[in-house]
Amino acid sequence: MNIVLLSGGSGKRLWPLSNDIRSKQFIKIFKDENGDYESMVQRMYRQIRAVDENATITIATSKNQVSAIHNQLGENVGISVEPCRRDTFPAIALATAYLTDVIKVDPEEPVVICPVDPYVEMDYFEALSDLADIARRGEANLVLMGIEPTYPSEKYGYIIPKNDDAISTVLSFKEKPDMQTARQYIEKGALWNGGVFAYKLKYVLQRAHEMIDFTDYQDLYAKYDTLEKISFDYAVVEKEPSIQVMRFSGQWKDLGTWNTLTEAMDEKVVGDAQMNENCSNVHIVNEIGVPILAMGLKDVVISASPEGILVSDKEQSSYIKPFVDEMDQQIMFAEKSWGSFRVIDVEDESLTIKITLNAGHRMNYHSHDYRDEVWTIIEGEGKTIVDGMEQPVKAGDVVTIESGCRHTIIADTELKIIEVQLGKEISVHDKHKFELEE
C-alpha cells in the first residue's frame, strides 16, 4: 500500500502543548502497547506498519516539521517537503510527483491520502487497504472514504451517496452546514467527509500537468512558491464526475480541540499532577517540573508547558484560538532531528536553554554574529569542535564560544546541556551553517 499522510497546521487549539513548530500530531499523550507515551503521528505510523509492514509511507509536510518527524519516526521515513505553504492541492501534487519520480512507484499504482492526526483503531487501516484496492480496479477516478456520522456536526463537510451500499457513486458534496441542515443531511444518508481518498498516481499527475507547467518532481519543487493556493477539493474533487465513496463505520475522531482530545486519552493525568476524589471529568497534562493539584473541579482541562498554562472548561476550550492568535511568544520547546530544546529563562540580553542531544547525533557546524554562548554539560559524554579544534566533554565541563566562532557538539551518549546565549541581538536568524570536515 502507498499512503501519504498530510501533516500540517500549527494546532493552536491545543495550546499550550502546541506551537508553530510543535503541531498537535507530535504531542505524546497516548500509551502504546509497552506503556510508553507516543504521539498521534507515532501511533498512526505504528498502526499502518501493523497492517502492512511493507507499506510505502510518505509524510507531506512543511519544512518546520521535518525535524520533529525525524525525531519521532527516525531518519528513514519518506518525507515530501513543501518549500512553503500552498494548500492541499499543491501539497498532494508534489507528494504524487515525489512517489513517481523519486521513489519510482508505478503511475498505475494507487495511493491513499489521509490526515495524520485522526484517532482511529486497526479497522481504519484495513479500510484504507480496501480503499486502495477499489482505486486499483479503476471504476472511478477518485474513491473517498465516507465516515458514518455519529451526530450532526457543523465541523465537517458531507458526502451525499447515490445509495446506502458499502460502495456507492457520489451524487454531491455539501459544505460545512449549520446544525439543523446537518440533521437533514444525516436523515438522507449523508456521510462525513474526513479528507480520506485514493486514486491512481497517474490521475493526479495528469490533473497537475493540466493546471501547472512543470516537467517532473524537481521542477515542481523549484516552482512551488509560484503555485496558486488552492485546496484539493476545489481544484479536483468538485470538478471530477467519476467518484465513488466507501462507507466506514469504525471509530474515527478528529482530535482538534482539548474537548475531543481528552475523550481519547488513556489516563486522566499525564505528568506530575494529582486530583482529589471530588473532581469529575477532569484531565491534566503537565510538561513542566512543577506539580499541579486539582480539587473539586468538574468538566475541566488543565495543561501546562513551557509555552504557558491553560485552565478551561472543556466545552469553552474549543474557543481558544483567537486568544492564542493574540500572543506574540518565543518558541519555548521544540523537537529536532538531533534531540530537543526547552527554553528555561528569557532576559533582555540573555536566553537560557536546556538542550538534550541524542546519542550519535550532533548540531550543525555553525556560527553567530551577535551573540556569545556558554555551554555547561550536565549529563553524558561527547566532544565539541570549535574553529576546527576538537575537545572531549563530560558532565561538569564548561565551554565558552565567542561570536564568530564556528562550533558544534557531538554526542557519544545522550548529552544534556545548559546553553546560555549572551548578546544584545539574540535571534534565531543569527546563524551561519558550514560543512564540517571529517
Image: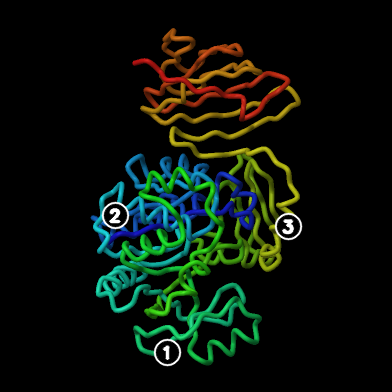
Residues at badges 1 and 2 in contact (C-beta under 8 Å)? no
Quadrant location of the N terminus in the rendered image: bottom left
Report x, y in % for residue 14: 61, 55
Of the two numbered discs 1 and 3 in the rendering, the one whose residue sits closer to the viewer: 1
What label sits on residue 56 in the rendered view?
2
Mark 1 Cα within 10 Å, few/some/many (few <14, many 20+)?
some
Q: What secondary structure is marked by label 1?
A: loop
Q: Earlier in the sequence, mark 1 or mark 2?
A: 2
In the rendered view, does 181 fall on the left or right side of 225? Answer: right
Label 1 sits on residue? 162
Label 3 sits on residue? 322
Q: CA distance from mark 1 to mark 3?
A: 39 Å
In the rendered view, does 336 fall on the left or right side of 431? Answer: left
Report x, y in % for residue 58: 36, 52
Indicate the amino acid at tag 3: Pro
Please state which of residues 67 and 137 is positioned toward the viewer in this rendering: 137
Please state which of residues 120 and 408 is positioned toward the viewer in this rendering: 408
Q: CA distance from mark 1 to mark 2?
A: 33 Å
Q: What secondary structure is marked by label 2?
A: strand
Mark 3 Cα within 10 Å, few/some/many (few <14, many 20+)?
few
Instruction: In the rendered view, tell whether residue 250 sits above or below residue 334.
Output: below
Q: What secondary structure is marked by label 3?
A: helix
Q: Earlier in the sequence, mark 1 or mark 3?
A: 1
Residue drawn at x 49%, y 74% as measured from the top left: 238
Indicate the amino acid at tag 1: Lys
Residues at badges 3 and 2 in contact (C-beta under 8 Å)? no
Report x, y in % for residue 377: 51, 19
